[in-house]
Image: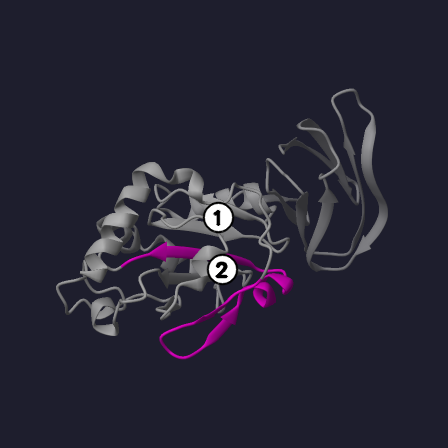
Amino acid sequence: MKKTLLILTIAFASFQGKSQWLADGTALSSTFSMTDLNGSTYDAFTILNQGKHLVIDFSATWCGPCFAYHQSKVLDRYYDKFGTNGTITKDAQVVLYEVDPSTTLADLQGTTGATQGDWITGTTHPICNPSSATAVSKFLQPGTTSFGVPAVFVVYSDKKLYKISTGITQETNLRNYVASKCGLAPLSATEIQDLGFSYDLYPNPANHAATLKLNMQESAEINLKLTNSLGAVVYAQNELKLNPGIHDIAIPTESLSTGIYFLQLQVGQRTIQARVAVSH
């Protein structure tokens, strides 16, 4: 009966309680810890203070929409590419957080009548099944007693949270969404090859900053400037001497107004131009 009542409470909240979650852009006021099924513990602020972002999926084993989202495997693919042992980079932590304290390991394994299926097999990111879902309260408005699941959030290193639509089921789109909120490099295939070097500019649109990635085949001096639509220089770096290899150059955009800007990049004797959108 306890689980039945909890199901009814959360199901009702999924229709009536959308405003119960903290608004996008709200900073978490304090940290929380999570222990996964293997006994590994994760402290949220420790993760964020390492410059990483946290993607957390609040779900329940008996929740049909939760299981449908889980079966999309988008968070597994995201974790495989950007998580602890990511094949592309390692700037993310992904956690599935079971919100029902009465859920058992057997429920997660899919062997009881109180679950939608097997949540463990094939899941590559950590699963946490706490006896008290204290982490959920960190994401709720004060006084909230009911909430809807699934609810998926990304928390950036500045502790600000943003809700992720469960309609995003491709890791490329998820990366782009995270980039739009957190200023991270999106998963992309936009690197452009030029003579003696290749380059990429991301995220575009940029929020806090854009990153110019240069893959130098030989040493060269570079100069760059960013201008607004009136031609005024808003940012510049000159006489940077780069050796062969990959170099990431940060272009701060946080103080710039939303709009279109123009990047002029000179690498040795080559000059290229690119358009940069800034969106806050």
Amino acid on which the number 2 mark rests in the picture: Phe
Residue at 64% x, 53% y is 158
Which quadrant, please, contains the N terminus? bottom left
Q: Give the range drawn in magenta.
A: 31-60
Residue at 49% x, 46% y is 141
Q: CA gap, disc 2 to disc 1?
A: 9 Å
Residue 121 appears left or right of 205? left
Work out whether mark 2 precedes mark 1 in sequence or the reverse, and give the earlier one.
Answer: 2
Residue at 30% x, 55% y is 70
Residue 98 magenta: no
Residue 48 appears left or right of 174? right
Which quadrant, please, contains the C terminus? top right
Residue 242 position by quadrant: bottom right
Do we see residue 176 in this rendering? Answer: no
Residue 44 magenta: yes
The residue to which callout 1 is attached is 175
Nearer to us in this view, 219 or 139: 139
The residue to which callout 2 is attached is 82
Residue 201 appears left or right of 12? right
Residue 218, given in percent of the width and then of the height, sits at: 73, 56
Q: Which residue, as the protein is rendered here, is positioned at the far left?
A: 113
Q: In the image, is residue 278 above or below residue 158? A: above
Residue 16, given in percent of the width and then of the height, sits at: 33, 37
Residue 261, given in percent of the width and then of the height, sits at: 70, 29
| Circle number at residue 146 | none
Nearer to us in this view, 29 or 126: 29
Q: Which residue, as the protein is rendered here, is positioned at the far top?
A: 230
Residue 95, given in percent of the width and then of the height, sits at: 42, 62
Nearer to us in this view, 36 or 148: 148
Amino acid on which the number 1 mark rests in the picture: Arg
